[in-house]
Image (cartoon, rainbow, N blue to C red):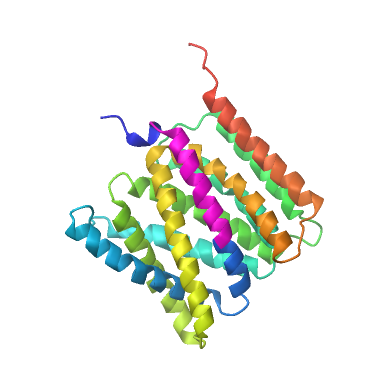
Amino acid sequence: MPPQPAERPLAAIAAQFVCFMLISVADTILKIIVSELPSWQIMAIRSASGLAILTPIILVQMLRGRGTIVTRRPGAHLFRASLSAVSVFAYFEALRELDLPVATAILFITPFFVVALSGLVLREPVGLNRWIAVAIGFLGALVIIRPGPEGVSIAALLAVLSAATWGAAMVAIRALGKTEGTLAILFYFNLFICLIALVFAIPGWQPVPLWLLGVIGLNAVIQLVAQSFMLMAFRFASASVSAPVQYTQLLWSVAAGWFIFSVMPGPHVFVGAAIIVFSGLYLIWSERRPRSPG
């Protein structure tokens, strides 16, 4: 039987579009709450909220015979969660200093990490055209970051680290999706993220107001739905094909930055983002054009 992921690219694009729209909403909420609590504590509470929401759903689905959390690959789940934990922590810390559209634009290099790792780890074909797109994409990132004689800001470096580890986590999701069900992936992701975050959060735990617990819980719901759409996309098409849809996230981030935080990014952010988007469009075009025989 041919693998399902290569059969429905348009469905994957639609699922990723919804996914990144929801992620933009979640990021807007995070930009507000990172000033209230340490990053590891936010991660721990959000993951615990996700587990509380997932558990009854998982039990119902298991009783109906529609899924299971039984896995033979706990190490793979832990590895993916560890990558995601580093990515999320780095992004939370970057959000403390960077405007939301700038942080989002830097994360646009995530698909290029996915392209590279898809070839190295998943053995998916990665031709010269994809490597050209990767090079152009990183050029766009440099335009956004604007390294100068004084170097690059720590916040910008954290955003790049977040992109790199999130790209690796996306490839790990792709690999897990070949053998693991959606319920298992979502359950172990939130379980391991919660445990990892608690290790770092407990020593400096701070009291949490009820309103903030509610906001973090809402963020957890949005993230869970976004994760579901991401998993759906990766089952429909290869990670390197659907990942460039992330570019639509800039539209939502700019809108949120303008209407909620009264911030409009500088021209260099739009120029850098345009270069990255161009590289993604080039990638899509080069993959779809007819190949000459021989």
The answer to whether residue 36 is visible is: yes
Q: Main secondary structure of the magenta part?
A: helix
Q: Total marks drawn?
A: 0
Is residue 209 depicted above or below 66 in this figure?
below
Percent across and percent down for residue 145 are 73, 54
Is residue 44 depicted above or below 240 in this figure?
below
The answer to whether residue 40 is visible is: no
Percent across and percent down for residue 25 are 57, 60
Tell me the quadrant of the picture where the N terminus can be found: top left
Is residue 234 depicted above or below 105 in this figure?
above
Q: Residue furthest bottom?
A: 207
- In the image, the segment drawn in magenta is 7-25
Residue at the location (41% across, 33% down)? 8
Percent across and percent down for residue 202 are 45, 83
Q: Residue furthest top?
A: 293
Residue 159 lies within the magenta run: no
Q: Nearest the camera: 139 or 64? A: 64
Residue at the location (28% across, 50% down)? 180
Percent across and percent down for residue 282 are 62, 31
Q: Nearest the camera: 89 or 241? A: 241
Residue at the location (55% across, 21% down)? 289
Is 235 displayed left or right of 109 in the figure?
Answer: left
Is 134 displayed left or right of 122 in the figure?
Answer: right
Residue at the location (69% across, 69% down)? 97
Is residue 56 depicted above or below 238 in this figure?
below
